Image (cartoon, grey):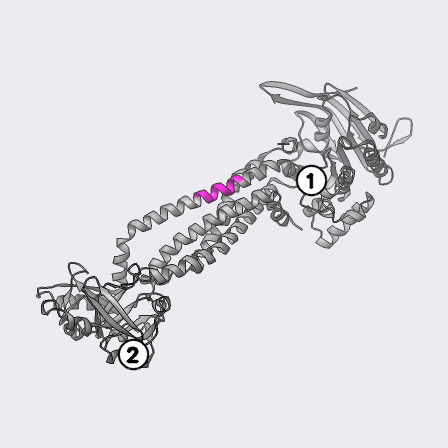
Amino acid sequence: MNLASIAVRNVWRNRFRALMTVLGVAVAVMAFVMLRTVVTATNVAVTYAAQDRVGTRHKVSFILQLPRRYIDTVRGVSGVRTATFANWFGAKLPARPDEFFASMAVDTDTFFDVYNEMSVAPADLARWREDRRGVIVGDVLARKMNWHTGDRVVLRGTIYPGDWEFTVDGVYRATRRSVDRSQFIFHYRYLNEALPAGRRDQIGWIIARIDEPTRAASISRAIDAAFDVQDVQTTSMSERAMNLSFMGMLSGMFTAINVISLVILGILALLLGNTLAMGVRERTQEYGVLRALGFLPKHVVAFILSEAAALGAFAGAAGLALSYPVVQQGLGRWIEENQGATFPYFRIEPETAAAAFALAVTLALAAAALPAWRASRLTVTDALRRLD
Amino acid sequence: MTTTTQGATQPAPIVRIEGVSKRFRRGGEDLTVLDGLDLTIPEGEFVALMGPSGSGKSTLLNLIAGLDRPTSGRVVVANNDLGAMSDGQLAAFRARHLGFIFQTYNLMPVLTAAENVELPLLLTKLPSAERQRRALIALRVVGLEDRVHHTPRQLSGGQEQRVAIARAIVNDPTILVADEPTGDLDRKSADAILDLLVKLNTDMKKTIVMVTHDPAAAERATVTRRMNKGLLQ
């Protein structure tokens, strides 16, 4: 037995109040974990971006297209090992128009060489390359739609009107967290040949794999320089920089998340502070007894702070116990399946969990600091007299 | 022991109060609770302090126990001039020399009887096993060896007060101070507590200073001192 172990027992003296506080703080901790997971999940694209990939898009906007012949020029730039291109298709399932997933027409010969974190079985890849209407889908999308190899799938184009028929030739799996596992990847040739002559041979973007990641900036400049005198100029940058620029567009959202996180922390501190202040007030006479027995003011402070830390730890642990099933298993699964393009990996990072737990304990300690200081300043006789 | 002019031996004083005054400021007014009080308590005496409410007996008890300081005068207990001690030294003095018995027992409800008794020993360097052994001995002295694992809620008022007495004696103090120790008890329980205090005084030679309103309790003491308006009568 020591003062700390007594303090831990003190937490549950008023069980109903302690339980309500723990639950209240647990919900606040879960909300905090959820918000921070949004931030970390958004950052996944930057954190796990390939170091050796350079992206090239239209200089004005990424919604404008590039001439297909640019791919040959990019492949000829010094330092570029291989390059591929893709074009946004943007189609829906006629029977399930609310389902969103990324659909792209790609260069079948090179796409999976450049995006080698998307793993496809060699037999499936070979079959797909030979099948003009073939499609490779992400494992999450395949599971969600219950698609299997050989299934026929019809998409209704939004950018390219009409019904487009495909055959599922295989499934890709992710070997890196940044991969959206709900993509629909098919032959650029299939799209291009179906378009009217005036819309043919246009591509959305080019991705090049380079020899030396440290040369990404100079290679990007060399690629853009190659198109300076063309009608359509380009903007090239490393994949990480490209993802960062996308994140820059979300800065307002991050600011809002940070503000809400602070509000949640404030609520959390108030909940803990209220419970702890009531507990200290009710036990003032006991602190007087401790002082009479020879304990010092610092012991009273340690006693109260130990109780606060224990309450914060209980609440933090309860918050995490709530967060994993709700945020990771429930919401996270749903988001990965339905918002995989933005949040391919929506999981609670260990750092987030540790920060949430540490904050619950730290805020409990901070909330208890003033009541503890006041209790320690009381004279023994005043503390013993306090009956309310 | 000291020798009187007649040659008889008297116990050495364990408490010496010399010209002690205590004033409080309440509601903008100075209130004199003790006014130039002198008192000597020989070692081994069982003193009952009686008097009406506001007579200053609890204040005097607090001064003897080192819980408060006099406005003027000297309080010397077990050869320690309490007025000259720092707060930390006073706390150490209380831990070493004082055993407290309160009217409302003041036990920790989350602790068992044994743990409550062990509480003052947390300030010592004794190992856990030795602390527990001494707590059990103290509980045996007060006749509660069969209630060691009971929490205060599972005990009667009289049993709670006996646990409080065990807590007061566990560190073998020089003086026991008791503030209305029977004030919350029925007559039978009160008598049992007083029997115990008498036993501690006679068998273990503990000096006891007890504040009480109860004449029956005062009768059990060896000396009764009456107070009125801050003075001993």
**Res. B91 image quadrant:** top right
User: Is any atom of residue A213 visible in this view?
Assistant: no
Which residue shows up at 41% across the image and 57% down it?
Answer: A331
- Left or right for B175, reference A145: right
SS at mark 2 in the image: helix
Q: Are marks 1 and 2 on the same chain?
A: yes
Say whether residue A241 is left or right of residue B123: left
Sooner in the amino-acid sequence: mark 1 or mark 2: 2
Report, in whole angstroms, how far the alpha carbon at label 1 lies from the one at label 2: 80 Å
Q: Position of residue A326 (x, y in %)?
A: 45, 56
- Left or right: where B224 falls relative to B122: right
Quick one: A195 or A20, which is closer to the camera?
A: A195
- Identity of the amino acid at label 2? Leu
Q: Chain of mark 2?
A: A
Q: Tell which of A315 and A215 is nearer to you.
A: A315
Residue A293 - label = 1
In the displayed image of the protein, which residue is found farthest to the front? A95
- Residue pointed to by mark 2: A125
Magenta stretch prevailing secondary structure: helix
Image quadrant holding the C terminus of chain A, namely top right
> What residue is rendered at 53% in x and 51% in y?
A313
Q: Does residue A327 sit above or below A379 in this rendering?
A: below
A147 or A234: which is nearer to us? A147
Region of the chain picked out in magenta, as a range: A266-274
